[in-house]
Amino acid sequence: MISETTLDPEEWDEVGFAFHQAVDQCMNNMKSVRNRPVWQPVAKESVLRQNVPVPTGERSLYELNSFFNESILPFSNGNTHPRFFGWVHGSGNIAGVMGEMLAAFMNSNAGGRDHAAVYIERQVLNWCKNIFNFPFESSGIITTGTSMGTLIALKVARNTHAGGDIQKLGLAGMPSRLVGYTSSEAHCSAAKAFELLGLGHDALRRIPVDSEYRMDIEALKHRISEDRMNGLCPIAVIASAGTVNTGAIDDLKRIADICHNQDIWMHVDGAFGGLAILAPEFHGRLTAISLADSIAFDFHKWMHVPYDAGCVLIKNEAEHRKAFSSRGVYLAGLDCGLAGGEPWFCEYGPELSRGFRALKVWFTMQAYGMDRFAELITQNCNQARYLGELVKSNSGLQLLAEVTLNIVCFRYYDRGVPEIELDQLNIRIVTELQLSGIAAPSTTTIKGHTAIRVSITNHRTMTEDLDLLVEEICRLGNQMRGK
C-alpha cells in the first residue's frame, strides 16, 4: 500500500487556539503601538542574524508563535507607529489585515481562470477607474507597488510608440533610439524601468524643475524638439503627482497637452500623491490625471492597505493586453468551467502566479469608504503645514522647501556652523532619533543641503507627535553642539 500523509492537523481545535493566540498577540501589539519605540535594531546576538540549519523536524505553532512574539514582532521597520515619518510608508489598517488573512486561507492564484478572486480584483479596478475618471473600458492590474506598475505601463508605452514590432524584433530592430522624459525630482523606479526594458537609464532625460520642484515645461518641450532633430524617438513622459522629495505635483494638464500634440505616451507616477485627488483641496490639481495614458499608484501608502498592494491603470486595453499576452496551450481558456473567466490577469502583467492582493484592498475600501480616506489625507496635509510653521517659528531650524502636500524638509541650523558640519550634524540627529526609538524621519538632499525629511502618511499621527519631534530635534542638536 501507498503510505500517505497530509499537512492538515490531526487536532483542528488545537490549531484554532494557536491562531487565536497569534491574533491576540498582534492585536495587543497594535493597540499599544504608541507606547513602544518607533524602531529598534535586531540585536547582534539574535538568532535572526545567525546561519541556522535548514529545519527538518516539526515545531508546534505555539512554539513558533512564542518565537515570533519575542524575536520578530518587536523588530519591524516601525511604520505602524504614529511617529514613523521616514520615506513614504502607509501605517496599515485592521480591515486590511483581515482581508490579507482571509486571502491566505483561500490561497487563490489570481493569474486567471473563473473564481471569486478575479471578480474582486475587477471590482477594485473599476472603483479606481472611477476615482481617476478613467474610461470603464480601460484595463488595469493590481501589482506589488508603483515600481512594478510603472514598469508595466512603460512596456506598453515602449511597444506602442517604438515604430516597429518590438516584441518580435527587439530594440535592435527599431528604426530609431527610444527616449523618454521625467523630472530631476522623479522617483528612481522610472530609471530602473528603462534599464529593465533595455532602453538604458541614459535614455530617460531628466528635465530640470522650477522653484516649486515641478518639471520645467519649457525645458521639456525644448528637449523633445532637440531629440527629434537628432533622429531619436520620444515614447513617454513620466509626470509626478507628488514627488518623493517634497511632494511637488507636476503641471499635469500642460504635460498632457504636450504629449497629445507630440503623440507621446503620458504616464503619471501617483505612488502616494495620486490619491490626494480624493481631498477637495487637491482635486483640481490632479484632475488632469484623467488625460494620461496610464497611472501607477499604491494602496499601501495613503490608503494604508497592508504591504504590498499597488495598481496600474492603462487606457488602451488592447495595447496593454498585446504587450503581455502570451498563453501556451496548457493555459487555453474555455467558454465555461474553471478555465473560463476571460480575460485572464496574466495577460496584463509579467506574472502567471499572482496572490489575491485585491481582497485586502476590497476589505479596506468597503470598511472605511473613500470619504474617510479623503479626510485622513487632508488631515496629514494640515499636519504637514503645522509642522512647517513650527519650523519657521524656531530660530534653531530652517525650512528647506515650501510645504505643498504632506512632506516637510528642514534641518537643524546654526549660522556659525560650516555647511559640511551641518550636513553631518543633521544625519547624526536623524540617526539618534531612530536609535532612541523616539521617531523615524529620513534624510534627503535639498539644494545641496542635507535635510531632515518628514513624510506624514500616517493615520495615527497627531500634532502632539510633531511637537515632540521638533522638541527632540532641537534638544539633540543643541546637545551635539555642546549648547
Image (cartoon, helix red, strand yellow):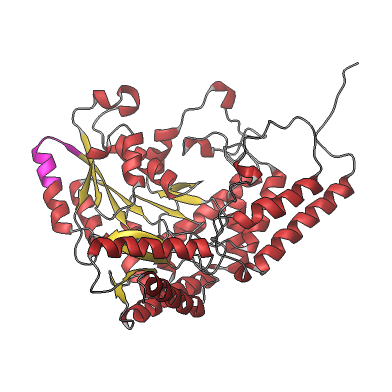
Residue 367 on image: x %, y %: 63, 66
Residue nearest the observer in this picture, 155 or 451: 451
Residue 69 on image: x %, y %: 71, 54
Name above or below for residue 330 compared with residue 250. Answer: above
Prevailing secondary structure class for the magenta stretch in the rendered image:
helix
Left or right for 344, reference 5? left
Hey, which quadrant is residue 91 in on the image?
bottom right
Hey, which quadrant is residue 448 in on the image?
bottom left
Magenta region: which residues?
224-233
The quadrant of the rendering that contains the N terminus is top right
Say if residue 246 shows up in the picture: no
Residue 67 on image: x %, y %: 73, 49
**Outermost residue, front direction?**
482
Name above or below for residue 185 compared with residue 262. Answer: below
Residue 228 covered by magenta stretch? yes
The quadrant of the rendering that contains the C terminus is bottom left
Q: Residue at x 61, y 33 (%)?
A: 335
Left or right for 284, reference 86? left
